[in-house]
Amino acid sequence: MSEDTFKLEVDETELFLGDEVKGTLRVTSQSEFDVEEMWVNLRCEEKIGREKASLYDSNVQISWAMHIPAGFDKEFPFTIKLPFIGRETFRSIHHSVDWFLDSFINVKGVNTTLTAEGSGSILVAKPKEPTQESVKEIVREVVLIPCPYCGGLMPQTSVFCPNCGARRKG
């Protein structure tokens, strides 16, 4: 198993809340072995002094039990949706909050869970704020004209008077 590689790769490492984390787990093998399961874990932790508090945790199963023959080389794609809003921190906003993406492989006959190369922290920012370009204000003018029958005001584009119901002339 020393020549076998498990590599976690992500498309982007700088994301916003609400985005999707997309990537692949690549398994390259020179030996033969059996995998019990593979999964990717996304978690958010807050550091409070020497202690850590978990704010978010999500697992995605990549594969169940499978046989890996010698010469195996395959990518397993995954997608994990980040939450739209972050959970409030346990202490305050000034404490350190970090996001981590890890991939784990349980190999049959090996007592420890293997961590894929490339596992580590990713940068997650607050939700995207709407920009001035994305916010449009629509102003509509309505011209009112008098009804020739009742004298009440009606929109110039109306076919019938809203007051008396008479059909507009012309």
Image (tube, rainbow, N blue to C red):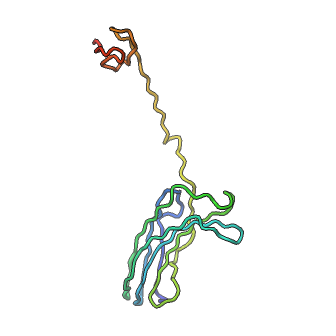
The spot of residue 31 in percent (x, y) is 41, 90
Work out whether residue 116 or residue 155 is closer to the camera in this orientation and state it.
Answer: 155
Q: Residue at x 49, y 56 (%)?
A: 18
Work out whether residue 136 or residue 30 is closer to the camera in this orientation and state it.
Answer: 136
* Vertical placement of residue 169 versus 18, above or below: above
* Vertical placement of residue 108 versus 140, above or below: below
Work out whether residue 26 or residue 94 is closer to the camera in this orientation and state it.
Answer: 94
The spot of residue 16 in percent (x, y) is 53, 57
Left or right, residue 77 beside residue 14:
left
Q: Residue at x 53, y 74 (%)?
A: 119
Q: Quadrant of the C terminus?
A: top left
Number of numbered markers = 0
Q: Residue most toward the right?
A: 49
Work out whether residue 138 or residue 145 is closer to the camera in this orientation and state it.
Answer: 145
The image quarter in which residue 33 lies: bottom left
* Vertical placement of residue 74 versus 166, above or below: below
Q: Residue at x 66, y 67 (%)?
A: 47
The spot of residue 143 in percent (x, y) is 41, 18
The image quarter in which residue 79 lies: bottom left
* Vertical placement of residue 37 versus 137, above or below: below
The spot of residue 40 in percent (x, y) is 48, 72
